[in-house]
Image: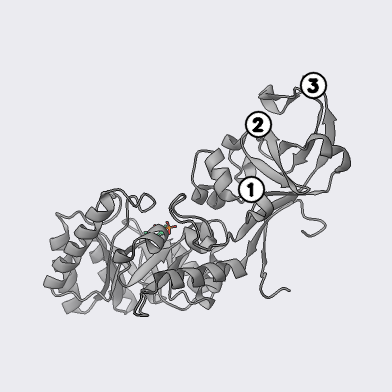
Amino acid sequence: MTDSARAEIVVDLAAIRHNVRRLREAVTRPDGSAPAVMAVVKADGYGHGMVPVARAAREAGAEWIGVATLEEAVALREAGDLGPLLTWLAVPGEDHGPALARDVDVSAYSIEQLTAIEKAAGAVGVTARVHLKIDTGLSRGGATRADWPELVAAARAAELAGSVEVVGVWSHLVASDEPERAINDEQELRFLDAVAVAERAGLRPRWRHLANSAAALLRPSIHFDLVRCGIATYGLDPAPGHTQGSGLVPAMTVRARLGMVKPIEPGDGVSYGHQWVADESTWLGLVPAGYGEGIPRAASNRVDVWVAGARRPARGRICMDQFMVDLGPDGAQLAAGDAVELFGTGHDGAPTAQDWAEACNTINYEIVTRIGGRFARIYVDSERDR
Ligand SMILES: *Cc1c(COP(=O)(O)O)cnc(C)c1O
């Protein structure tokens, strides 16, 4: 930690590269063939930084990058990213032109969207590469199964007119983190059916894709041509309880310096509302970060942090800028300025984003994606900075 840093998010780019390599190994088939790996870097790289993560992922062999919005895709191109890049969330009125002009693949869920893409492609003078999305059960984005035949027919007509090329057919899973649920099998069948309908209409989608991180690790039958991996790229477990031994390494460590260390007496309450009251004398440490930095208020009295080689429980409510931790009797030897790790790789039993997620009744995705605010974000490379 730099001497002056109050609170910072440290992202290890070597961990990102390691995780992409691990995913590539995990999806390689016995005959040596493998689907392409897409690193998903939407929402500022799940809180890790979209541009540096995309660069590290490409270096480690991710053939594709995926983002949700057109703005994210354009921002990545402006930052110098050149390879295959897919975007999948646009609303009526948004102009696909800037993304198409920058060689971005786009998604269509409906005939209206396909028409908007055709127009934008004509306006910028390119053939749009389109991935058609079928809703196989999530009931979120994607054409309904009833609308699919019409969408593929319209897409085939647009191909013959020369304004688009359908390069992909794709869908998204409902419960990939619960591999035993029957919906996984149903989605696989519905997806195969949708691909068959598209092929019968004359489409030849080079990229058929359905799997996210959990399915990349757990369900080889749906790897098809491409797997879209978000959370695993960041080293977090996509399906806790099902993916032990996946060899992923968390890339994000969140750390700070204690702002103050002080003793309290039995009966002293801590933080707003005195939701925690000491029953014996102890020492408190002030962590200078709070819900203004995306630390969930739900973490109040529930999470641990790591100080001086041990887990220390958060005490009382998490505030906007700060929260308190219980240092126990060790606090007498600690001082303001000492390092505190909120969560990270889990070294020596230190807390992880997964531990925080369980304590806050949420998922690791939300913990890392929301963290930010006034934290500085810095990048290290544990393979190269030695
Ligand atoms: C976010 C997202 C992913 C990545 O999911 P993970 O579970 O993080 O691997 C894949 N596909 C789509 C459509 C997404 O929105």
Give 356 or 170, whichever is nearer the viewer.
356
Specify few, some or many for label 2: CA neighbours under 10 Å numbering under 14, 14-19, or 20 or more. Answer: many
Front residue (pair 239, 149)? 239
Q: What amino acid is found at the position of numbered circle 3 in the picture?
A: Pro
Secondary structure under the numbered disc 3 in the rendered image: loop
The location of residue 47, given as percent across then percent down, is: 56, 56
Regarding residue 154, the answer to whether it shows in the image is: no
Q: Amino acid at mark 2?
A: Arg
Task: Tell me the residue at 66%/56% (across/down).
Answer: 347
Residue under the point 79% across and 21% down: 266
Q: Quadrant of the N terminus?
A: bottom right
Residue 266, numbered label: 3
Q: Residue at x 30, y 54 (%)?
A: 141
Q: Is residue 26 visible?
A: yes
**Against 23, is 43 above or below?**
above
Q: Amino acid at mark 1?
A: Pro
Q: Quadrant of ligand 1?
A: bottom left
Q: Determine whether the residue tagged by mark 1 lies in a helix, strand or loop.
A: loop
The image shows residue 64 at horizontal and vertical percentages of 42, 73
Of tags 1 and 2, which is closer to the observer? 1
> Which residue is the extreme one toward the left?
200
Q: How far across and how far down the image is residue 149, in percent? A: 13, 62
In this rendering, position of residue 222 left or right of residue 72: left
**What separation in Å lies between label 2 and label 3 (alpha carbons)?**
18 Å
User: Counting residues from the N terminus, which is met first, the one under dot 1 or under dot 3?
Assistant: 3
* Other-residue count near label 3 (Cα within 10 Å), few / some / many at <14 / 14–19 / ≥20: few
Reading the image, the residue beneath label 2 is 317
